[in-house]
Amino acid sequence: MSTVIEKSELVKWLSDVLPKDAILYRDEDLRTYECDGLTVYRGMPLAVVFPHTTEEVSEVVKLLHKHEIPFIPRGAGTG
């Protein structure tokens, strides 16, 4: 079961483990990520992150797990 959180709270937590330029959270920036190659299924994410290192990926996954926040890894966006 996932925890309901505010976007601002999530962004703060992510900012603790990632550089600011690696986090997208404004609605206009997230539109591109509301669906993948299959546009029938849409869902606006609270945030999108672009970790630069393996350590950053690990820290993000640990943070999300700790707060029971589900995530979807995205590849090239082709479905």
Image (cartoon, rainbow, N blue to C red):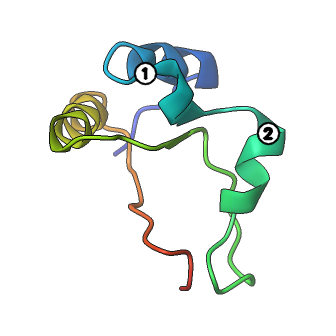
Q: Secondary structure at mark 2?
A: helix
Write down the quadrant of residue 41 in the picture: bottom right
Label 1–label 2 contact, CB within 8 A: no
How far apart marks 1 and 2 lie (CA) works out to: 19 Å
What amino acid type is highlighted by mark number 1? Pro
Q: Toward the viewer: 3 or 52? A: 52
Q: Earlier in the sequence, mark 1 or mark 2?
A: 1
> Residue 60, position in %: x, y?
29, 35
Identify residue for label 1: 19
Q: Which quarter of the picture shows residue 39?
A: bottom right
Q: Between residues 24 and 64, which one lies in front from this camera angle?
A: 24
- Residue 52 image point, x, y percent: 33, 41
Disc 2: CA contacts within 10 A as few (<14), some (14-19) or many (>=20): few
Tell whether 23 sits left or right of 69: right
**Element under disc 1:** loop
The residue under the point 61% across, 39% down is 46
| Residue indicated by mark 2 | 27
Where residue 72 appears, x then y in whole percent?
42, 60
In this view, the mark in front (1 or 2): 1
Q: Residue at x 71, y 47 (%)?
A: 30
Q: Residue at x 30, y 28 (%)?
A: 67
Residue 52 to residue 23: above or below: below
Which label sits on residue 62? none
Relative side of 15 to 5, left or right? left
For this orientation, the residue located farthest to the right is 28
Give the camera-side residue of 10 and 33. 33
The image shows residue 14 at horizontal and vertical percentages of 41, 23
Q: Residue at x 64, y 84 (%)?
A: 37
Q: Residues within 10 Å of mark 1 (few under 14, many from 20)?
A: some
Amino acid type, label 2: Asp
Split into 4 quadrants, where in the image is the N terminus? Answer: top left
Tell me: 14 left or right of 67: right
